[in-house]
Image (cartoon, rainbow, N blue to C red):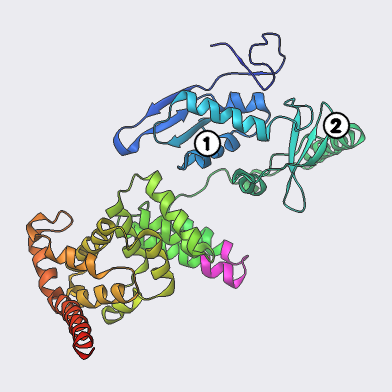
Amino acid sequence: MASINIGGDKNDENYRYKMPPLSCVIEGRGHGLKTAFINIADVAKALHVMPQYIIKYFGFELGTQSGYDEATSKGIVNGKHEFGLLQNLLEKFIDVFVLCPKCKLPEINLSVSSKETIRYLCASCGAKADLKTSHKLTSYIVNHPPPKKAASGAHKNAEKEKAKQDEKVRHVTPIEKKDVEWKSEASLDAQRARLKRDLGELTPEEAEKRGKIEAIIQAAKELGAEKSSSTLLNVFLVQSERSVDEIYHEIRRLQLSRSLDDAQKLKLILEVFIDVTEPKKVPQQFENARTRAILTKFISPTDRSISVLLINCIEDFVGVIHPKLLPLFPLILKSLYENDILTEEAIVAWYQSSAEASWVVSPDVARQTRAKAQPLIDWLQDDDEDGDDEDGDDEDAE
């Protein structure tokens, strides 16, 4: 396919700035569909940008997970996307991050300033200033700045001279074979030894984090769940203090990258944020500010179906995974109700649904959870009746 002009007149065959068109293929099937960009490295080279920038831009614009594999030089965006849409998005990217705002030629070099702003310098017209855009990609570029250009002039000659001197030193001072380690032990014992050695160079806080991460990974290995979503989320939480928004976006990232349905997503939240080591304290954990805020991000009181699904997942949590928690089921629902995560309508709708129609747990477990919830249902309905009586008494009094 013919090359495409980078900016300028699209019909000008003599235009000097050109790039190859995107080459995309659809991989996977069902919920695992992905759009793969097999020549994204060539496109990025023509635009003088890092290929990660283009792929991340697509991900932000399409509202989905994206990534770039340096080993294969291939970009991936979750979902199936039409070529025309992607090519249009690429043109928008070029307009903001490739073309000079002044001369409109693709001759700008990007850099990140000490003030964490993106600067551009045009090699054609000499214009230089901050790049004026509030696109989400700017944060990614600031955190992943482009490589600095090679040095020139006297500085470049000085670097060459230094390299020559280093080469002389290498020839004068031979390296004995016994000082060279050519292999790296991959066993668990070797990994632990390296971890122990590395921990000695860390601050106490960093060492504590590393220790926790090692414990999470080791526990996951023993369960055969080293690469599970819960393990990845637990490691993410330990690495640093995370805001609710950061946790929300990480859960969404895992959902998209691993094609989790809504039930699997909610089960992941329960597995990671509810500690079952002290059963009596489990209902209180649903009142925890962080847990409540995260659930609120995913549960809308106006969406009865997702609220009922949360109850279904809690049925599985207390009736199948941790059956010792089954007696606490009504207290958990009551805690969610009192903290405005579940509404009375959602709880009653779940209770009145047929146990035989349950698809998250077996009918047997569904009947058990409904029997345990009976006192809560009675309490909710009694509360409604008391409210009606009070209204009636007021009318009689009038």
Residue at the image point whose x is 72% and y is 26% from the top = 106
Estimate how packed mark 2 is, as few (under 14), some (14 to 19) or many (20 or more) residues with alpha carbons within 10 Å: few
- Name the quadrant containing residue 189: bottom left
Q: Please give left or right for residue 299 compared with residue 89 in the image.
A: left
The residue tagged 2 is 126
The residue tagged 1 is 58
Mark pair 1, 2: CA separation: 29 Å
380 w.r.t. 40: above or below: below
Residue 100, image x and y in percent?
75, 31
- Name the quadrant containing residue 312: bottom left
Circle 2: element type: loop
Q: Amino acid at mark 1?
A: Phe
Instruction: Report whether residue 270 is seen.
Output: yes
Q: Which residue is nearer to you in this view: 197 or 238?
A: 238
Q: Which residue is nearer to you in this view: 130 or 325?
A: 130
Q: Which residue is nearer to you in this view: 284 or 105?
A: 105
294 w.r.t. 95: above or below: below
Q: Amino acid at mark 2?
A: Gly
On residue 26, which mark appears? none
Instruction: Report whether residue 277 is seen.
Output: no
Q: Please give left or right for residue 132 compared with residue 324 in the image.
A: right
Write down the region rendered in magenta: 198-209
Residue at the image point whose x is 57% and y is 11% from the top = 2
283 w.r.t. 231: above or below: below
Instruction: Verify whether residue 64 appears in magenta.
Output: no
Residue 78, image x and y in percent?
42, 37
Query: Do the CB atoms of the residues marked 1 and 2 lie less than 8 Å apart?
Result: no
